Amino acid sequence: MSANESNQPQFAIDTDKLNLWYGTFQALFDVDLQVKRGIITSMIGPSGCGKSTFLRTVNRINERLGYVRTTGEVKVMGENILGPSVELVQVRKQIGMVFQRPNPLPISVRENVLFGYRLHADAGRIPRQEQEDIVESALRQVLLWDKVKDRLDAKATTLSLEEQQKLCIARLLPVKPSVLLMDEPCSALDPKGTEAVEELIWELRGSYTILIVTHNMAQARRASEECIFMLMGKVVEHGDTGDMFVTPKNKETADYIEGRYG
Amino acid sequence: MFEASSLNRKNLRNERLVKASLGLMTGLLILPVVLILSTLLYKGGPVISFEFLFASPTNGMTAGGIFPALLGTILLVLVALIASVPLGVAAAIYLSEYAPDNWFTRAINLAIINLAGVPSIVHALFGVGAFVIFFKFGTSILAASLTLAIMTLPVVIVATRESLQAVPQAFREACWNMGATRWQTIRRVVLPNAITGILTGVILEVSRTSGETAPIMFTGAAFFLPLLPQGVLDQTMALSLHLFVVSTQVPDMPEELPYGVALVLISIVLIMNSLSIALRMYLRGRKKW
């Protein structure tokens, strides 16, 4: 990572008494979460428990719904992103988001990878060689380079779903985000695609802080180092994934993991 | 065992009856179109010639060509487009991409739909009041074109808004989540994917505008002019008004001449409509999401 590693906070995401309302419905209750930097953390819990809401609060995408109200503090890399001087564009640049359904733009593979970079580049053209380097390095990081290097000018929408999802991750990388949020990134993929994307997420560990929301218990267990269990808008348990799945401290966690509800 | 019962037979008879009468209705619907087109072609076809299209009328409009009217219609449509397309597209972008969904936006949308329903003669009178008198453009191409522009704005706005909204929301979210501003999103992703739809709307506007008579007859179109217009503040002849004039206002008119004018006018409209349909088909074939 960067040279000032020692100055960086221990927690990539650090929330303090985060409450959130959709109109009069409260979706998050006093959420205090510390997500460690550089590891993969998964969030599990039954539908409607607030895990997606939490994810969407961290990159402030929730605000587009006019009736959302938030209190408390969300610090990303040590800075409160709900502060008054925060510019949304900078938040989104630091925090990449991957959606359930792959959503590549209807332009070429190459342009998809360069899209974010172009948005944030200073005015002027990016030299050809630099473009090539960015595209290759991003696609290599997501283990896609060998598959698409001859199809860089094909429309991204012609790739398979698995390749599209990898591309959606790849296009976040050139702007050098510190946090990657993934909202059920494999739920639209077949088992083989799921395995490939999980493998890729595991590869990215260390370089990025990754927070994955998943409905798939096995995925949380396989592909994350820490795990958060949420229920009815509250954090029930947060700990080492291995420990949590073997010896959950909480009865509700145990019930959920064993599939008694959810 | 499988023969038709009497109930079956009754149902089958009804079925045939309904099918036949529905088919007949459809045939009746096509009949006027076929009749109009064939009459025009039969009576007006022989009139059409290079000279008819590119010469001025002579002998009190009973001979010669229709060039000033043809040119006038093209000019009127062109100026109307220059005025209405940027305005309409801008308004549609705002309404579709920026405006919050509240009662005010909904009121504006309702107003636009109502504007489309205003009869063209009312637009004409508005044009006289606003452009001819208040802005002192006089009866001129400018005043007539602006009147046409106001009249066709709803078409442009609605067509543009629809093609913008046909661009999947997922594309916008993808852009926003990479930190794109709204305008960056619109310019790089939304507009390039909506542009063919917008063009279709614009072409439809052309076809509608070129046939309108009421909005231009008080605001800029003239009965007869010996000279071609020299600028947008001059009056002009126009095909639609010319058709009205040669059909009803001029004595001793050769019978086939109005048919020729009508044929030219309807050809412009049909060509524009076919272009717009072709463009839409091309667009549909190319879409891959």
Image: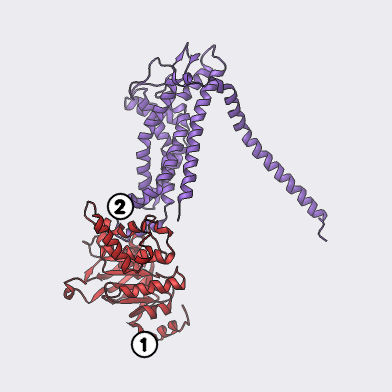
Residue A206, by quadrant, is bottom left
Q: Position of residue A227 (x, y in %)?
A: 35, 79
Q: Residue at x 37, y 48 (%)?
A: B192
| C-alpha span from label 1 to label 2 | 48 Å
Pointer 2 local density, CA inside 10 Å: few below 14, some 14–19, many at least 20: some
Q: Nearer the viewer, residue B51 or A103?
A: B51
Q: Position of residue B267 (x, y in %)?
A: 51, 29
Marker disc for residue B184: 2
Q: Which chain contains the residue that carries disc 1? A: A
- Three-letter residue code for mark 2: Gln
Color of chain A here? red
Q: Residue at x 29, y 59 (%)?
A: A116
Q: Position of residue A183 (x, y in %)?
A: 38, 69
As drawn, the chain in purple is B
Marker disc for residue B175: none
Reading the image, the residue beneath label 1 is: A249
Residue A59 seen anywhere in this rendered image of the structure: no
Q: Residue at x 38, y 80 (%)?
A: A222
Q: Which chain contains the residue that carries disc 2? A: B
Task: In the rendered view, tell whether residue A91 sits above or below residue A29.
Answer: above
Helix, strand, or loop for circle 1?
loop
Residue B32, by quadrant, is top right
- Three-letter residue code for mark 1: Lys
Task: In the rendered view, tell whether residue A45 sits above or below residue B54.
Answer: below
Q: Position of residue B261 (x, y in %)?
A: 51, 22
B2 vs A89, left or right, is: right
B223 vs B17, left or right, is: left
Helix, strand, or loop for circle 2?
helix
B213 vs B136, left or right, is: right
Tell me which colouring the rendered structure shows.
Answer: by chain
